[in-house]
Amino acid sequence: MKNMTLQVEGMSCQHCVNSIEGALAEIGATGKVHLDNNTVDVTYDESRITLERIKETIEEQGYDVL
Protein backbone atom coordinates (compact mmCIF):
# COMPACT_ATOMS: atom_id res chain seq x y z
CA MET A 1 0.00 0.00 0.00
CA LYS A 2 1.21 3.46 -0.90
CA ASN A 3 0.57 6.54 1.23
CA MET A 4 0.56 9.99 -0.34
CA THR A 5 -0.41 13.49 0.79
CA LEU A 6 -1.88 15.73 -1.91
CA GLN A 7 -2.31 19.50 -1.77
CA VAL A 8 -5.88 20.29 -2.87
CA GLU A 9 -7.48 23.71 -3.41
CA GLY A 10 -11.15 24.56 -3.11
CA MET A 11 -12.14 22.50 -0.05
CA SER A 12 -14.02 24.39 2.65
CA CYS A 13 -16.76 22.33 4.29
CA GLN A 14 -18.07 18.91 5.28
CA HIS A 15 -19.64 18.48 1.84
CA CYS A 16 -16.14 18.76 0.36
CA VAL A 17 -14.88 16.09 2.76
CA ASN A 18 -17.73 13.72 1.92
CA SER A 19 -17.40 14.34 -1.81
CA ILE A 20 -13.67 13.61 -2.00
CA GLU A 21 -13.56 10.75 0.50
CA GLY A 22 -16.59 9.10 -1.13
CA ALA A 23 -15.22 9.42 -4.66
CA LEU A 24 -11.88 7.93 -3.60
CA ALA A 25 -13.63 5.03 -1.88
CA GLU A 26 -15.50 4.28 -5.11
CA ILE A 27 -12.23 3.70 -6.98
CA GLY A 28 -10.71 1.63 -4.15
CA ALA A 29 -8.57 4.23 -2.40
CA THR A 30 -8.85 5.53 1.16
CA GLY A 31 -8.82 9.30 1.58
CA LYS A 32 -8.69 11.51 4.66
CA VAL A 33 -9.39 15.19 4.02
CA HIS A 34 -7.79 17.86 6.23
CA LEU A 35 -9.59 21.17 5.72
CA ASP A 36 -7.23 23.05 8.06
CA ASN A 37 -4.25 22.68 5.73
CA ASN A 38 -5.95 21.83 2.40
CA THR A 39 -4.49 18.34 2.11
CA VAL A 40 -5.81 14.87 1.41
CA ASP A 41 -3.99 11.82 2.76
CA VAL A 42 -4.51 8.94 0.34
CA THR A 43 -3.75 5.25 0.79
CA TYR A 44 -3.98 3.03 -2.27
CA ASP A 45 -2.70 -0.15 -3.89
CA GLU A 46 -0.28 0.89 -6.65
CA SER A 47 -0.95 -2.33 -8.54
CA ARG A 48 -4.65 -1.41 -8.87
CA ILE A 49 -4.82 2.40 -8.98
CA THR A 50 -2.47 5.03 -10.37
CA LEU A 51 -1.72 8.34 -8.71
CA GLU A 52 -2.96 10.01 -11.90
CA ARG A 53 -6.35 8.29 -11.49
CA ILE A 54 -6.58 9.52 -7.90
CA LYS A 55 -5.85 13.09 -8.98
CA GLU A 56 -8.43 12.84 -11.78
CA THR A 57 -11.03 11.54 -9.32
CA ILE A 58 -10.51 14.51 -6.99
CA GLU A 59 -10.56 16.97 -9.89
CA GLU A 60 -13.80 15.41 -11.22
CA GLN A 61 -15.38 16.46 -7.91
CA GLY A 62 -14.51 20.11 -8.70
CA TYR A 63 -11.26 20.58 -6.76
CA ASP A 64 -7.75 21.42 -7.94
CA VAL A 65 -4.88 19.09 -7.11
CA LEU A 66 -1.61 21.06 -6.98
Image (cartoon, rainbow, N blue to C red):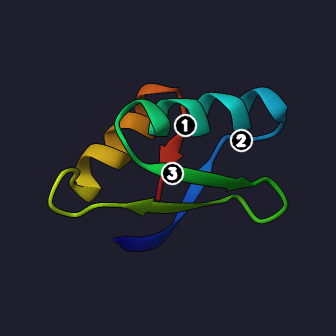
Element carrying mark 3: strand
Element carrying mark 1: loop
User: Of label 3 and label 2, which has the lower sequence position?
Assistant: 2
| Residue topped by disc 3 | 30
Tell me what residue is drawn at x 45 percent, y 63 percent: 43
Position of 60 compared to 62: left or right? Answer: left
Distance CA(mark 1)–CA(mark 3): 17 Å
Name, please, the residue furthest toward the left: 47
| Residue topped by disc 1 | 63
| Residue topped by disc 2 | 11
Distance CA(mark 1)–CA(mark 2): 7 Å
Q: How many numbered tags mark residues here?
A: 3
Q: Is residue 6 above or below residue 55?
A: below
Q: Position of residue 3 (x, y in %)?
A: 44, 73
User: Of label 1 and label 3, which has the lower sequence position?
Assistant: 3
Q: Position of residue 19 (x, y in %)?
A: 62, 28
Q: Amino acid at mark 3?
A: Thr
- Which quadrant of the structure image shows residue 32? bottom right
Tell me what residue is drawn at x 18 percent, y 51 percent: 48
Discs 3/2, front: 3
Q: Amino acid at mark 2?
A: Met
Q: Position of residue 13 (x, y in %)?
A: 84, 35
Instruction: Confirm or deny contact between disc 1 and disc 2 (CB under 8 A).
Output: yes
Discs 1/3, front: 3
Q: Position of residue 60 (x, y in %)?
A: 41, 27
